[in-house]
Amino acid sequence: PRVELAWAMKAHQHAQVYFNLISSVDPKFLKLTKVDDQIYSEFRKSFRDLRIDVLDPEDLKSESAKEKWRPFCLRFEGVVEDFNYGTLLRLDCSEGYTEENTIFGE
């Protein structure tokens, strides 16, 4: 529980920074890491049909989903600094970070 709380706190800090960035810069010009294109390409190969504008928590939290997410994340070990940390996600990308619209993905 303490580790998960620490992850959640760090994820919240990252979410605030990234939300400020994506709210102030046209996302087509925004690069968060030098491997953004690689991450997105690998993501789309692994999750072709995953709807990203409105997320279904089952696509992130179910056991079958976790079996797909783990290998995806492990591809970035040594490439992305915090590759295996949890993150806060907005369920509906058209809305902000609120309790009802936020899920902790690990």
Image (spheres, rainbow, N blue to C red):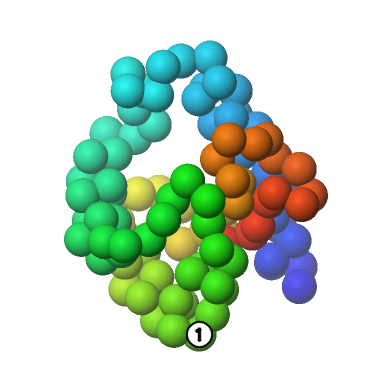
Q: Nearer the viewer, residue 44 or 88?
A: 44
Left or right: residue 44 versus residue 33 is left
In the image, what residue occupies the spot 46% across and 15% down?
Answer: 25
In the image, what residue occupies the spot 46% across and 62% down?
Answer: 84
In the image, what residue occupies the spot 23% across and 39% down?
Answer: 37
In this rendering, the answer to whether 29 lies above or below 63 is above
Would you name the residue on which mark 1 appears? 63
- Quadrant in the picture for residue 77: bottom left
Amino acid type at image mark 1: Glu
Q: In the rendered view of the protein, which quadrant contains the N terminus? A: bottom right
In the image, what residue occupies the spot 50% across and 85% down?
Answer: 63
Q: Nearer the viewer, residue 90 or 70?
A: 90
- Quadrant in the picture for residue 61: bottom right
Image coords of residue 8 (percent x, y): 69, 55
Image coords of residue 27 (percent x, y): 39, 24
- Label 1 element class: helix
In this rendering, the answer to whether 36 lies above or below 48 is above
- Quadrant in the picture for residue 36: top left
Q: In the rendered view of the protein, which quadrant contains the C terminus? A: bottom right
Left or right: residue 81 versus residue 24 is left
Image coords of residue 13 (percent x, y): 66, 38
In this rendering, the answer to whether 13 lies above or below 20 is below
